Image (spheres, helix red, strand yellow):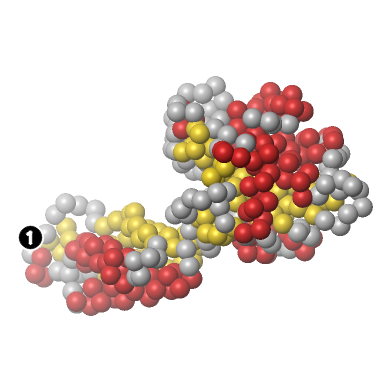
């Protein structure tokens, strides 16, 4: 793979940085140590640093030449509230927190590209290195946009990389159109009438009502939607009662809805609300649905996707680029940036058939350090390709 030789030379230093971040994970909007580390390194390479965007977020600015062209490269920095169970030497030192999605690697790959570009300056224009907090549910990307990210740092196009354990190391998934789903949250509260388990006829059982809501909700996808559309409705929590012989007063259900279009989003919300109300009414009680819109779908722009494919092919090889692939039901708040500026979200493989093929959000996940020079080279090639000198 034709990675950039200079980036390969400082791969050991990048791997050490990645492992340091992994060992000291920080939750969304709490990435103070990570943000400090990133700022110090950028400044040591002569890159202008702007901090305090979305709290712990920061942007590094590197200018060269006279062109007014600009490009944004984004990495996320936060970890997940999970207990790590791996036995790697650099495992998390913070109880209940770990980098189980590879954000430690994403941050490091962008640092590698920044160091190389600051040394070589083989481009004509401005690069914005965007280090974002709180991707894991906190909406740090949305907050950065709302706080004027692209007004303060005008950007013609914007790109992000995400590791993919399901793809072999060095392959990339870069497709136009929807690549990840919208993620909405649902909370259902069922009110019943409690009592002794031996006298159900004197009670209204919210567990029974809730169970029927769970089953009926699945009919939305199978019977209310166009079969060519996609959606996933998952009820992931069901809490009720405190004893085995007591019919409780209340049942609480929580879950997610994943969709790719606003029309399907609207349909699912309306139908789910109707099911919650009608099933409860049929049992002589009432229930409420709280439907919270989350991250919008991540939609790649066609032209910028083509440009990302070209840069990736130069680094990884043309046959290792997956240009057609079905969208996935995961979600990403890079979607907010793509709603404001054209760009693309790139999945890059890290799988090795062993421990680096462990899925994202798994307590044994670890980023593959062999991916670092590939991702850094891809970021750098994008800049050199889109803003060539001369």
Q: Is residue 200 left or right of residue 350?
A: left
Q: Is residue 82 left or right of residue 377?
A: left
Task: Determine crowd level at label 1: few under 14, some 14-19, many 20+ residues with C-alpha closer than 10 A.
Answer: few
Which residue is found at the position 35% from the left and 70% from the top? 226
Say which of 53 and 114 sits in front.
114
Say which of 106 and 98 sits in front.
106
Residue 160, x across and y down, in percent: 64, 48
According to the image, label 1 marks what residue? 198
Residue 314, x across and y down, in percent: 68, 39
Q: Which quadrant of the structure image shows residue 300?
A: bottom right
Q: Is residue 135 left or right of residue 260?
A: right
Q: Is residue 319 visible?
A: yes
Which residue is found at the position 77% from the left and 50% from the top? 386
Q: Is residue 111 visible?
A: no
Residue 268, x across and y down, in percent: 38, 70
Which residue is found at the position 69% from the left and 31% from the top? 3
| In the image, residue 235 above or below residue 264 | above
Q: Secondary structure at mark 1?
A: loop
Q: Which image quarter holds the N terminus?
A: top right
| In the image, residue 203 above or below residue 307 | below
Outermost residue toward the right in this view: 66
Say which of 376 and 203 sits in front.
376
């Amino acid at each position: 793979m034709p990675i950039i030789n200079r980036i390969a030379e400082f791969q050991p230093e990048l791997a050490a940085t990645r492992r340091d971040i992994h060992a000291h994970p920080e939750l969304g909007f709490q990435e103070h140590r990570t943000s400090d580390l990133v700022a110090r390194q950028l400044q040591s390479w002569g890159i202008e640093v702007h901090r305090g965007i979305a709290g712990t977020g920061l942007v590094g600015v590197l200018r060269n030449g006279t062109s007014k062209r600009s490009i944004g490269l984004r990495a996320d920095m936060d970890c997940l509230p999970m207990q790590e169970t791996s036995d790697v030497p650099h495992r998390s030192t913070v109880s209940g927190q770990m980098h189980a999605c590879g954000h430690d690697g994403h941050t490091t790959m962008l640092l590698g590209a920044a160091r190389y570009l600051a040394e070589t300056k083989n481009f004509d224009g401005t690069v914005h290195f965007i280090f974002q907090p709180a991707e894991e549910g906190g909406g740090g990307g949305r907050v950065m946009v709302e706080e004027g990210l692209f007004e303060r740092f005008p950007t013609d196009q914007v790109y992000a990389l995400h590791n993919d354990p399901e793809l072999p190391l060095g392959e990339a998934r870069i497709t136009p159109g929807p690549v990840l789903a919208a993620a909405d949250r649902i909370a259902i509260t069922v009110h019943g009438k409690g009592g002794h388990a031996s006298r159900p006829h004197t009670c209204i059982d919210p567990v029974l009502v809730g169970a029927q809501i769970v089953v009926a909700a699945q009919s939305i996808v199978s019977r209310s939607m166009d079969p060519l559309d996609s959606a996933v409705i998952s009820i992931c929590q069901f809490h009720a009662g405190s004893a085995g012989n007591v019919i409780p007063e209340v049942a609480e259900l929580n879950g997610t809805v994943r969709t790719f279009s606003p029309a399907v989003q609207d349909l699912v919300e309306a139908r789910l609300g109707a099911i919650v109300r009608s099933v409860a009414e049929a049992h002589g009680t009432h229930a409420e649905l709280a439907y919270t819109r989350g991250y919008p779908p991540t939609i790649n722009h066609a032209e910028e996707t083509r440009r990302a494919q070209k840069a990736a092919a130069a680094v990884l090889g043309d046959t290792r680029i997956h240009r057609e692939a079905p969208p996935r039901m995961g979600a990403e708040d890079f979607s907010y940036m793509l709603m404001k500026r054209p760009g693309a979200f790139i999945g890059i493989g890290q799988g090795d058939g062993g421990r680096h093929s462990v899925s994202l959000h798994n307590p044994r996940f670890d980023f593959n350090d062999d991916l670092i020079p590939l991702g850094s080279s891809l970021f750098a090639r994008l800049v050199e390709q889109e803003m060539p000198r001369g």
